[in-house]
């Protein structure tokens, strides 16, 4: 089976920030059969990284991705 982290990150990006993930549980189970906990966590981490980088690029404000991710609870 292939790693589903990037696919999950793309799915989360399409949903947007106000999505009710609990309501989408059945759909997510269907879309990501056999996803592991590590893949699940990495998918959310990839999504958070993309959001931070996009915000920094859009605003022109330099950020430390490592520090920003740590502030959100992602260990380096």
Image (cartoon, grey):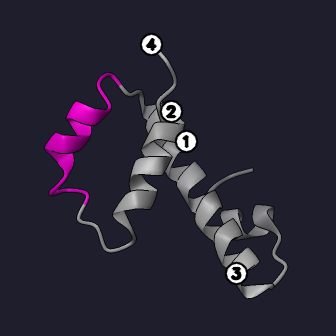
Residue that carries the numbered disc 4 in the rendered image: 1
Asked whether disc 3 touches disc 1, contact meaning CB atoms under 8 Å apart, the reply is no
Residue that carries the numbered disc 3 in the rendered image: 58
Residue that carries the numbered disc 2 in the rendered image: 38
* Residue 5 at x, y percent in the picture: 51, 36
Asked whether disc 2 touches disc 1, contact meaning CB atoms under 8 Å apart, the reply is yes
Whichever of labels 2 and 3 marks the residue nearer the N terminus, that label is: 2
Mark 2 to mark 4: distance in Å?
Answer: 14 Å
* Residue 23 at x, y percent in the picture: 15, 57
Judge depth for marks 4 and 3 and give the one in front: 3
Asked whether disc 2 touches disc 4, contact meaning CB atoms under 8 Å apart, the reply is no
Q: Which image quarter is the N terminus in?
A: top left
Mark 2 to mark 1: distance in Å?
Answer: 6 Å
Residue that carries the numbered disc 1 in the rendered image: 42
Mark 2 to mark 3: distance in Å?
Answer: 30 Å
Q: Which residues are magenta?
A: 21-34
Looking at the rendering, which quadrant does residue 59 occupy?
bottom right
Judge depth for marks 3 and 1 and give the one in front: 3
Q: From the viewer's side, name the closer residue of 36 and 5.
A: 5
């Amino acid at each position: 089976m292939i790693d589903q982290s990037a696919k999950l990150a793309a799915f989360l990006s399409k949903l947007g920030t106000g999505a009710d993930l609990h309501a989408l549980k059945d759909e997510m189970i269907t879309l990501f059969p056999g996803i592991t906990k590590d893949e699940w966590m990495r998918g959310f981490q990839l999504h958070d990284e993309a959001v931070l980088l996009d915000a920094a690029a859009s605003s022109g404000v330099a950020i430390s991705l490592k520090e920003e991710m740590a502030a959100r609870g992602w260990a380096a």
